Image (cartoon, rainbow, N blue to C red):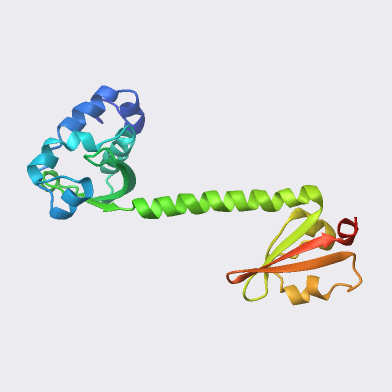
Amino acid sequence: LRDQGVTDLRRYLADRPEAIKDLAGLIKVLHVNQATLELFGAENEVALIHSIDRTFVEDSAAVFIEELNAIWEGRSYFRSEATFRKLDGQEITGLISMPISVREDEMRNVPVSILDITDRVKTEQALAASQSLYRTILESMNEVGEGLLIVSAEGRIDYMNQTMIDWFGEQTGKLCQDSIATLDPDANYSPVPVFSGKQRVVQYLSRRLVNR
């Protein structure tokens, strides 16, 4: 391909999906271990090798392009997250890894490992969704004039919503006892502490709201 003037392999393959299929067809799976059989839910090695096409999903082509590009660029190793499909149709997320050699004869048989990281990815996605929802709830408190801050186990302020910042100024990262806790005790705000794990959540209500 270089002799043909190709300089950007990603673009070349992206514009030629048929070339991706042709290149993928040149790869033959020779052997799989027991862990791989269990990962894909195959009864035996022959069953999995004969059904290897069923383990790929729509996004597999993009990962394959990156794998080829790693070889094209002369890297020594390739690693990427990828989605696979078990033989029962269930999708899983795997971390695929393979060494890359500059010697053509050493690339004839390449060991490829796939580590199942499905649970980790699901946990990360759930945590991200939870944090997004949590922050949305916290920010919505601004609309009703409620101030809220989160204090770490070490007593430092981890988070202040905008209402708290408007009232007391930016104090994030400071020790709570050196900032908000030492404000004028006659200030027109009522602290309402709530403990959650190792963090202390302190909700401040304007006394004007409390006395309505």
Position in image of residue 71 (x %, y %): 25, 42
Q: In this view, does 97 lie to the left or right of 178?
A: left
The N terminus: image quadrant:
top left
Task: Specify whether 171 is left or right of 34.
Answer: right
Q: In which quarter of the image is residue 204?
A: bottom right
Q: Residue at x 47, y 49 (%)?
A: 125
> Residue 100: image x %, image y %?
22, 49
Extreme residue in the front direction: 212
Q: Is residue 113 above or below residue 28?
A: below
Q: Residue 116: horizontal and vertical position, in percent?
A: 29, 52
Name the foreground residue: 114 vs 118.
118
Residue 31 in view here: yes
- Image quadrant where one finds the C terminus: bottom right
Q: Residue at x 82, y 63 (%)?
A: 168
Q: Nearer the viewer, residue 192 or 103?
A: 192
Q: Say if residue 111 shows up in the picture.
A: no
Residue at point 45%, 53% (across, down): 124
* Coordinates of residue 134 in the picture (x, y in percent): 62, 53
Q: How many numbered markers are drawn?
A: 0
Q: In which quarter of the image is residue 19?
A: top left
